[in-house]
Amino acid sequence: MFRSKMKSGLLASLVLGAACSPSVASTTDLGPLPTGATPFFGIVSSNAFVDLFTFVLPQNGGTGSSVVNFPVSGAFGNFNTIFSSLVLLSNPNGIALDGDEITLASSSAPGASSLSLNWETPAGGAMILTVTGIGNGSLGGLYSGAISVSNVTPIPEPATWGMMTTGAILLGFGLRRKRS
């Protein structure tokens, strides 16, 4: 008798906990991304959500990301999504959410119907895009998004420019002296 009450109490607390806490709707691996745009989609339940999209940027790759609510209504009910944040994380070892992630860019606007962010600094390697929000339609929410990848040419530091200029001047003096 005590065991059945304990089991039903445990089951009730798990159901209540799942209903009250944000749900991780999905972790989607997009793999290595080519230059251009890669679309992605989200379908969320009728509560708070955190979606993770993992991908690999090419060396010297910059990225831009955006998400947009995709509202749908009908006799069956409606889908609607409001966003809280969009965060780009560097993931050095490729294992999602193990504590070594570094935030590269973020955008937040609680209650927004769309969010976007850009990261133009050359990067490469494993990344995570985190989308958070609430599916507040009677059936939850739908959204669409895209991750665009561009090649970013690194700009030399001022000290590097100085060394290159000095080297060119010394090379010019050396060639002129050799001719004389």
Image (cartoon, grey):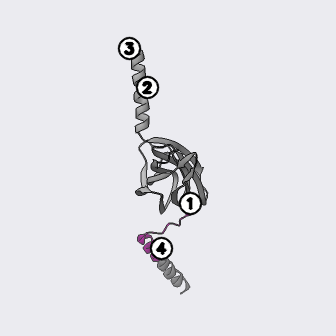
Please tell me which of labels 3 and 1 falls first in the chain: 3
- Which element is circle 1 on? strand
- Expressed as whole percent of the image width and height from the top left, the position of residue 115 reads 47, 59
- Which element is circle 3 on? helix
Cα gap from disc 1 to disc 4, whole angstroms: 34 Å
- Residue on which disc 2 sits: 11
Tell me, yes or no, if residue 64 can be seen here: yes
In this rendering, the label closer to the viewer, 4 or 2: 2
- Residue on which disc 4 sits: 164
Q: Residue at x 56, y 63 (%)?
A: 150
Please tell me which of labels 4 and 2 falls first in the chain: 2
Residue 69, compared with residue 5, is above or below; it is below
Q: Residue at x 56, y 52 (%)?
A: 72
Cα gap from disc 3 to disc 2, whole angstroms: 14 Å
- Residue on which disc 3 sits: 2
Find out whether residue 43 is within the magenta segment: no
- Expressed as whole percent of the image width and height from the top left, the position of residue 44 reads 51, 45
